[in-house]
Amino acid sequence: MIEVTDLTKRYRDLVAVDRLSFTVGKGEIVGFLGPNGAGKSTTMRILTGFLPATSGVARVAGFDVFEEPLEAKRRIGYLPEHPPVYADLTVRSYLRFCADLKAVPRQRLRDEIDRVAVRTGVDGVMDRLIGNLSKGFKQRVGLAQALLGDPEVLVLDEPTVGLDPLQIREVRELVKGLAGKHTVILSTHVLPEVALTCEKVLVIDQGRLVDYDTVAGLVAKHLPGRSVTLEDMAFLEEIYSKLVHPPALAAAAAAPAA
Amino acid sequence: MRSTLAIVRKELEVYFTTPIAYVVLMLVVFLSSLVFNGALDAYRYLSLRALSLGGDVSGQLNLTDLVLSRVYAWVGVWVLLAAPFLSMRLFAEEKRARTFELLMTVPVRPIQIVLGKYLAALATLSVAIVLALAYPLALALTARATGGGSAVEWQTVATGLAGVVLLAAMALAVGTFVSALTDSMAVAALAAFFLLAGLALLPLLAVTAEGPLKDIASALSPVQHLVPFVSGKVELKSVVYFLSFTALGLYLTDRAVEGHRWI
């Protein structure tokens, strides 16, 4: 679904992405892992057609993102590093605007906006100005925008930044729910995040591919003889969620305020 | 088409939910109304002078020429100066707020984005021009021509308004282009302001020049091209001037936006 061949991006003498090659199959969820400045965002910006590559080819669903940008963009939902939201619009009119730009069929427009709003949990703030929302909500509005039109490929640049642990878990469930039908690339520097969400991990450093394998493959390769389960990584979160969001409280919060 | 309309709609929503459109419109209308008052005073003074001199000059004192033409020339000047403050945010704000990344990654052509933004700004500025219809309406309600009938020559009003709309179209195209070059609204506003004011004032700079230099200076000035419109004439060269400036501005904006895909 995504094929990247010898992708290089150079800014004067700084090489941001250095002969990067990888492929992502249909329905896979791939985590981009790497330190700040490793070239994660640059790669994503090239994939989405925002930046041109210095050399190399990136194809999404068979379309070269530079030669056939409109065809490629039609198949991509993109959440940039900074959620691209307008402070002066309400959530509803923002999503309406994005749906129009993405040519969501008119008769499905309202349903589609409601669908992504419910999925990202912004359905309760539809008529508030985005500028007045918290960072977490802005992030979720940005995510809702990426999901509009049900694109085949989702490129999510740090989708969980600014969210609290429970929201992070919601987003993770959401992304996992996309697997199979959608191809997802997401970047993060929260390590457990990758293990819990992604099937495959792509590690880059200084613009170069360091390793690309499944989570189990990475464990087998780099920690031979150790057995690591996902439950080991999730324990802190479970404790946290029990403390701040016990089932009784959650039920009370879900009921409308009298 | 649909994406262009979506952008028009969003830009209008931002213009009219934030104070910017109201501030710009209020300033244009306020300054134009001052000019209208001044022109009416001058007209009254002239007619009183004429009466006291005893001559019958009522046929020569034309309300439309003496008041409305003058007012519309000034409306043009205010529109020219106001345009940069409407166009400044069109692209600069998107870049600053990082929403430009959204526009550049949705399946929309740059020209659709440019047209949507430009048309929204033009529609907003046109509100000020429509409000300037209040002056001929006030005159039509209160004044009568000597031979009966309307004191206002509506044909001149129509060409005057058309001229101001053309001027607004040109000024906003220049402003939109400047806005596409920077991510600072202040820079976008000031650069467009000085560019337009410079063009308008070119004849003043060339006042001592002679021959072709003087001709070129006045041929480049938008205000010089507005003059025939407000006095009731439609001159082809002025229409061509405004439209070609508009087309050039929009073309360059499209190139500037498309250029982001290449660097």
Image (cartoon, coloured by chain):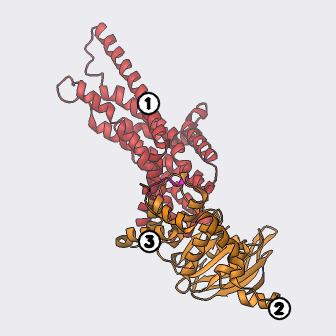
Chain colours: A orange, B red
Residue A5 visible? The answer is no
Relative to residue B126, is residue A170 drawn left or right? right
Of the two numbered discs 2 and 1 in the rendering, the one whose residue sits closer to the viewer: 2
Position of residue A122 measured from the top left corner of the image (x, y, whole percent): 50, 63
In the rendered view, tell whether residue B7 sits above or below residue B169: below
Position of residue A214 measured from the top left corner of the image (x, y, whole percent): 70, 88
Q: Are marks 1 and 3 on the same chain?
A: no
User: Residue at (62%, 65%) from the top-left corner?
Assistant: B259
> Which badge, 3 or 2, comes first in the chain's sequence?
3
Characterize the local packing of mark 1: few (<14), some (14-19) or many (20 or more) Cα atoms within 10 angstroms: few
| Cα distance in 3D space between marks 1 and 3 | 47 Å
Circle number at residue A84: none
In the rendered view, tell whether residue A107 sits above or below residue B201: below
Q: Which residue is mark 1?
A: B30
Q: Which residue is mark 2?
A: A224
In the rendered view, tell whether residue B134 sits above or below residue B222: above
Q: Which residues are magenta?
A: A125-131
Characterize the local packing of mark 2: few (<14), some (14-19) or many (20 or more) Cα atoms within 10 angstroms: few
Position of residue A242 measured from the top left corner of the image (x, y, whole percent): 62, 69
